[in-house]
Image (spheres, rainbow, N blue to C red):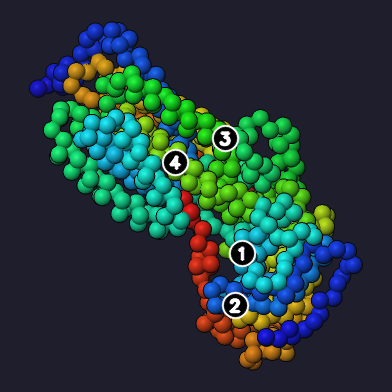
Amino acid sequence: MAKESDASVQPSVREPVIQLRDAELRFGDRVLWHDLDLDVSPGEFVAVLGPNGTGKTSLLKVLLGQNTLSTGSAEVSGRRVHSGNSAIGYIPQQRGIDPHTPMRGRDLVRMGIDGHRWGTGLFSRGRKKKVDELLASVGAQDYADAPAGTLSGGELQRLRVAQALANDPSVLLCDEPLLSLDMHHQKVVAALLHEQRVRRGTSVVFVTHEINPILPYVDRILYIVGGHFLIGTPSEVMTTESLSRLYGSPVEVVRVGGRLVVVGGEEECVNHHVHSDELDPERGAI
Amino acid sequence: MSAAEIFGTLFTFEDYGELVALLANSLVAAALLGVVGGLISVFVMARDIPFAVHGVSELSFAGAAFALLVGFDVVGGSIIGSIIAALIIGVGGAKASEKNAIIGVLMPFGLGLAILFLALYDGRAASKFGLLTGQIVAITPGQIMTLVICSLVVLAVLALVWRPLMFASLDPEVARAKGVPVSVLTIVFMLTLGLAVALSVQVVGVLLVLALLITPAAAATQVSASPVWVPVLSVIFAVTASVGGILIALGSPVVPISPFVTTISFLIYLVCRIIGGRRMKSLHRRRTVRAARQHEAPALTTP
């Protein structure tokens, strides 16, 4: 284990929105990561990178109160992590929606406002106005009344952003929100998230394996490889030297037409692969 | 036999007014079950678990057959059977693949048990047949009371958990992140589903439960995605099928009720499917138009 760089420079002196101290996460006798210290300031955009199965999604689940740290502590907005935290907006990995699912675009957003409350919610005042405002803020009014299952991936992600912002959270946790989007929509959704965090001062923790669409907006990167990690600004982390040390083998970071490409990284971690549904026994629950 | 003769045998509509008056209670029960079925089927569609409905109904059948054999109340037996099945599926089948396997394993077991109990039973053959094809016209006032109470329980539970249950059914990951007790709601829903199946078995029988618990919402979701209209349409469809089926069957001396219920249900679905086909085409056309518009004027927000 090596904390390769201690570049957790605080861009702001305000209270951190997320605070991880000596955090370790293990499943059985498999340690995903340990000794993780991370402070995320208000409005900060942090990308979480690394090969599959290194515990990026699991980190989000720790913050959501769904995975428990084996040691160390985790706080969101000054309070210990717990499930149902209204300070968090969550954008899950995209999955297909059947066109006949009884849910329109606006319903997805509305559930973000009061979907967790008991009762039928038939006579909720002022909710429509709030939904319309959220839809407008992400530019999704055009297709708000179309069934969610008939929307394109890009349109759906706009609605997901609106849904996650519904309760004015202090941090957005995004799990691969650009997956299965074409390059144009990757840029659009990344720009939208950036715009919202600037306007609202919301921090963003963004799990991804593709840094390029968000590179213009990222303040810091948490790069996890096989239990080791590196925290720093993109220019500190995304270099041949840093990543070679992190991977423990020669890795090359090259610039191709304005895009960063990591060569030789992913293969090193094949033995660390864990299928996401192994870590997530509740998926597809009836 | 000519077509007219067949029709004459099937439908006589003799003493129709008197029959309707005699069966007023059954009609009320059927209408109530239509409401329950219509609402439950919305969640069956939202959670995509029609197979589970069938699995539960087979164990409901076994419970009813056992009750018949030992002289216990048949409605009570079918409720116990289906609740056991619903709990096993709800607790055991966390993953989609597991769930289907568990249902597939339960189904033949339930059916086998039911056949065993019916073989051992040496009472009226009509009672056996009634379990398979529904028996609401032969139901006792006491049983109708049970149906009404259970239906009201299901409706009350649904009213209480409607919003979080819908959230958990449509968007389980975000629902969980928002603190919705997704796993608990799964069990609650499976219990109400078990009750609804046991109640519907009384109207349409074990074999045809799907006509009241799946088809109504399957038809409604063809023509709408609105969280208000889908349940409303689904209830209208289910009540039309259950009450309409009885009203038509009363005019026939030979044919049981369930074929009429299933036929009405099927015809409604067919019509909705045709309307829904056009609707989908236009929705996809609109999506293409949106994509093209965006391509011409890429609405990039602040880059």
Taking the image as shown, residue B182 lies to the left or right of residue A85, namely left
Q: Nearer the viewer, residue B18 or B12?
A: B18
Sort mark 3 into few (<14), some (14-19) or many (20+) by Cα contacts within 10 Å.
Answer: some
Which residue is tagged 1? A67
The kind of residue on which mark 1 rests is Asn
Whether label 4 touches label 2, CB < 8 Å = no
* Place of residue A113 in the rendered image (x, y in percent of width and height, measured from the top left): 69, 44
Q: CA distance from mark 3 to mark 2?
A: 42 Å
Which residue is tagged 4? B191
Determine the image quadrant of residue B3: top left
The kind of residue on which mark 2 rests is Val
Residue at 44% from the left image edge and 52% from the top image edge: B91
The kind of residue on which mark 4 rests is Leu
Sort mark 2 into few (<14), some (14-19) or many (20+) by Cα contacts within 10 Å.
Answer: some
Taking the image as shown, residue A184 lies to the left or right of residue A202, namely left
Which residue is tagged 3? B160
* Place of residue A137 in the rendered image (x, y in percent of width and height, measured from the top left): 76, 48
Marks 1/2 same chain = yes
The kind of residue on which mark 3 rests is Leu
Q: How many marks?
A: 4
* Place of residue A53 in the rendered image (x, y in percent of width and height, measured from the top left): 57, 74
